Image (spheres, rainbow, N blue to C red):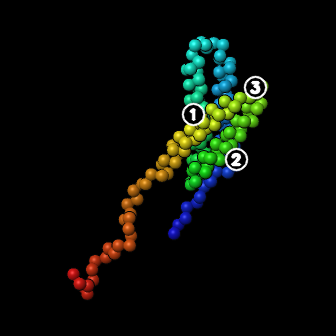
Protein backbone atom coordinates (compact mmCIF):
# COMPACT_ATOMS: atom_id res chain seq x y z
CA UNK A 1 0.00 0.00 0.00
CA UNK A 2 1.37 3.39 -0.96
CA UNK A 3 1.40 5.86 1.89
CA UNK A 4 1.16 9.57 1.16
CA UNK A 5 3.45 12.03 2.87
CA UNK A 6 1.67 13.69 5.75
CA UNK A 7 2.22 17.43 5.67
CA UNK A 8 1.84 19.39 8.88
CA UNK A 9 2.49 23.07 9.48
CA UNK A 10 5.42 23.82 11.75
CA UNK A 11 5.82 26.53 14.39
CA UNK A 12 6.97 29.05 11.78
CA UNK A 13 3.76 28.54 9.80
CA UNK A 14 1.59 29.16 12.87
CA UNK A 15 3.55 32.26 13.84
CA UNK A 16 3.43 33.59 10.28
CA UNK A 17 -0.34 33.09 10.18
CA UNK A 18 -0.78 34.78 13.55
CA UNK A 19 1.37 37.74 12.55
CA UNK A 20 -0.37 38.03 9.18
CA UNK A 21 -3.85 38.17 10.69
CA UNK A 22 -2.80 40.57 13.45
CA UNK A 23 -0.84 42.69 10.98
CA UNK A 24 -3.91 43.17 8.80
CA UNK A 25 -5.96 44.11 11.85
CA UNK A 26 -3.45 46.59 13.21
CA UNK A 27 -2.91 48.21 9.80
CA UNK A 28 -6.68 48.63 9.57
CA UNK A 29 -6.74 50.16 13.08
CA UNK A 30 -4.01 52.62 12.12
CA UNK A 31 -5.82 53.57 8.92
CA UNK A 32 -9.05 54.17 10.85
CA UNK A 33 -7.22 56.34 13.40
CA UNK A 34 -5.62 58.40 10.65
CA UNK A 35 -8.83 58.79 8.64
CA UNK A 36 -11.19 59.23 11.60
CA UNK A 37 -11.15 63.06 11.53
CA UNK A 38 -12.39 62.94 7.94
CA UNK A 39 -15.22 60.46 8.63
CA UNK A 40 -18.71 61.55 9.60
CA UNK A 41 -19.54 60.67 13.20
CA UNK A 42 -23.03 59.38 12.33
CA UNK A 43 -21.67 56.38 10.45
CA UNK A 44 -20.31 54.51 13.48
CA UNK A 45 -22.38 51.45 12.66
CA UNK A 46 -21.02 51.27 9.13
CA UNK A 47 -17.43 51.69 10.31
CA UNK A 48 -17.94 49.06 13.01
CA UNK A 49 -19.43 46.63 10.50
CA UNK A 50 -16.60 47.15 8.03
CA UNK A 51 -14.08 46.74 10.85
CA UNK A 52 -15.68 43.45 11.90
CA UNK A 53 -15.57 42.24 8.28
CA UNK A 54 -11.88 43.16 8.08
CA UNK A 55 -11.23 41.22 11.31
CA UNK A 56 -12.97 38.13 9.95
CA UNK A 57 -11.20 38.54 6.59
CA UNK A 58 -7.85 38.57 8.37
CA UNK A 59 -8.75 35.29 10.06
CA UNK A 60 -9.87 33.79 6.75
CA UNK A 61 -6.65 34.69 4.95
CA UNK A 62 -4.38 33.39 7.71
CA UNK A 63 -6.25 30.14 8.27
CA UNK A 64 -6.56 29.45 4.55
CA UNK A 65 -2.82 29.81 4.02
CA UNK A 66 -1.83 27.72 7.05
CA UNK A 67 -4.38 24.96 6.44
CA UNK A 68 -3.28 24.68 2.78
CA UNK A 69 0.06 23.49 4.16
CA UNK A 70 -1.62 20.61 5.99
CA UNK A 71 -2.77 17.28 4.60
CA UNK A 72 -4.82 16.14 7.60
CA UNK A 73 -6.01 17.10 11.10
CA UNK A 74 -7.48 20.35 9.86
CA UNK A 75 -9.35 21.13 13.06
CA UNK A 76 -6.22 20.67 15.19
CA UNK A 77 -4.31 22.98 12.89
CA UNK A 78 -7.10 25.55 13.13
CA UNK A 79 -7.18 25.43 16.93
CA UNK A 80 -3.41 25.89 17.16
CA UNK A 81 -3.58 28.81 14.74
CA UNK A 82 -6.43 30.53 16.61
CA UNK A 83 -4.53 30.09 19.89
CA UNK A 84 -1.41 31.69 18.41
CA UNK A 85 -3.48 34.52 16.91
CA UNK A 86 -5.08 35.24 20.29
CA UNK A 87 -1.70 35.20 22.06
CA UNK A 88 -0.31 37.74 19.59
CA UNK A 89 -3.46 39.84 19.90
CA UNK A 90 -3.15 39.94 23.68
CA UNK A 91 0.49 40.99 23.40
CA UNK A 92 -0.43 43.78 20.99
CA UNK A 93 -3.43 44.92 23.05
CA UNK A 94 -1.40 45.03 26.27
CA UNK A 95 0.95 47.47 24.57
CA UNK A 96 -1.94 49.96 24.33
CA UNK A 97 -2.46 52.64 26.95
CA UNK A 98 -6.02 51.39 27.67
CA UNK A 99 -6.26 47.65 26.94
CA UNK A 100 -9.83 46.40 26.55
CA UNK A 101 -11.32 42.99 27.17
CA UNK A 102 -14.03 43.74 24.60
CA UNK A 103 -11.47 43.99 21.81
CA UNK A 104 -9.93 40.66 22.81
CA UNK A 105 -13.39 39.08 22.79
CA UNK A 106 -14.23 40.50 19.36
CA UNK A 107 -10.88 39.37 17.96
CA UNK A 108 -11.34 35.88 19.41
CA UNK A 109 -14.78 35.57 17.81
CA UNK A 110 -13.44 36.96 14.52
CA UNK A 111 -10.50 34.56 14.47
CA UNK A 112 -12.76 31.56 15.16
CA UNK A 113 -15.34 32.50 12.51
CA UNK A 114 -12.69 33.51 9.97
CA UNK A 115 -10.72 30.37 10.77
CA UNK A 116 -13.72 28.13 10.15
CA UNK A 117 -14.42 29.83 6.82
CA UNK A 118 -10.74 29.57 5.85
CA UNK A 119 -10.73 25.90 6.89
CA UNK A 120 -13.74 25.23 4.69
CA UNK A 121 -12.20 27.03 1.72
CA UNK A 122 -8.82 25.31 2.09
CA UNK A 123 -9.97 21.79 2.93
CA UNK A 124 -13.00 21.52 0.64
CA UNK A 125 -11.07 20.48 -2.50
CA UNK A 126 -9.17 17.88 -0.47
CA UNK A 127 -12.33 16.37 1.01
CA UNK A 128 -14.37 16.02 -2.18
CA UNK A 129 -14.32 12.50 -3.60
CA UNK A 130 -13.00 12.67 -7.12
CA UNK A 131 -13.94 9.86 -9.51
CA UNK A 132 -10.93 7.64 -10.10
CA UNK A 133 -12.41 5.32 -12.67
CA UNK A 134 -11.63 2.29 -10.50
CA UNK A 135 -14.16 -0.29 -9.42
CA UNK A 136 -15.20 0.33 -5.84
CA UNK A 137 -15.12 -3.34 -4.79
CA UNK A 138 -12.10 -5.04 -6.35
CA UNK A 139 -12.73 -8.41 -4.69
CA UNK A 140 -15.27 -9.35 -7.37
CA UNK A 141 -13.95 -11.96 -9.79
CA UNK A 142 -14.30 -10.56 -13.29
CA UNK A 143 -12.75 -13.49 -15.16
CA UNK A 144 -15.01 -15.58 -17.42
CA UNK A 145 -16.35 -18.83 -16.04
CA UNK A 146 -14.25 -21.90 -16.61
CA UNK A 147 -15.60 -24.84 -18.57
CA UNK A 148 -15.82 -27.01 -15.45
CA UNK A 149 -18.07 -24.63 -13.54
CA UNK A 150 -21.80 -25.14 -13.28
CA UNK A 151 -23.91 -22.62 -15.16
As helix, strand or loop, the secondary structure at mark 2 comes to: helix
As helix, strand or loop, the secondary structure at mark 3 comes to: loop
- Residue at image location 68% in from the left, 24% down from the top: 30
Question: Label 1 to label 2, Cα distance in Å?
Answer: 21 Å
Q: Which residue is mark 3?
A: 98
Instruction: Tell me if residue 1 comes above or below residue 76 in the rendering.
Output: below
As helix, strand or loop, the secondary structure at mark 1 comes to: helix
Instruction: State the residue in front, 44 or 15.
Output: 44
Q: Which residue is mark 2?
A: 12
Question: Is 148 displayed left or right of 43 in the figure?
Answer: left
- Residue at image location 62% in from the left, 47% down from the top: 79
Instruction: Tell me if residue 70 comes above or below residue 48 in the rendering.
Output: below
Instruction: State the residue in front, 132 or 76.
Output: 76
Category of crowding for the residue at label 1, using alpha-carbon neighbours closer than 10 angstroms: few (below 14), some (14–19), many (at least 20)? many
Looking at marks 3 and 1 on the same chain, the residue that comes earlier in the sequence is marked by: 1
- Residue at image location 60% in from the left, 36% down from the top: 109
Pinpoint residue 50: horizontal percent, then vertical percent: 56, 25
Pinpoint residue 123: horizontal percent, then vertical percent: 52, 48
Question: Label 3 to label 1, Cα distance in Å?
Answer: 25 Å
The quadrant of the rendering that contains the C terminus is bottom left
Instruction: Tell me if residue 38 comes above or below residue 99 in the rendering.
Output: above
Question: Is 8 displayed left or right of 150 in the figure?
Answer: right
Instruction: State the residue in front, 52 or 2.
Output: 52
Q: Which residue is mark 1?
A: 57
Amino acid sequence: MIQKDVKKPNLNDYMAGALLSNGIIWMWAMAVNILQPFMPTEDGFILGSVTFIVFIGAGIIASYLVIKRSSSDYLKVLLKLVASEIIFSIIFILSFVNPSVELITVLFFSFVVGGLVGLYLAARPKLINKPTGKVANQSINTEPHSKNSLN
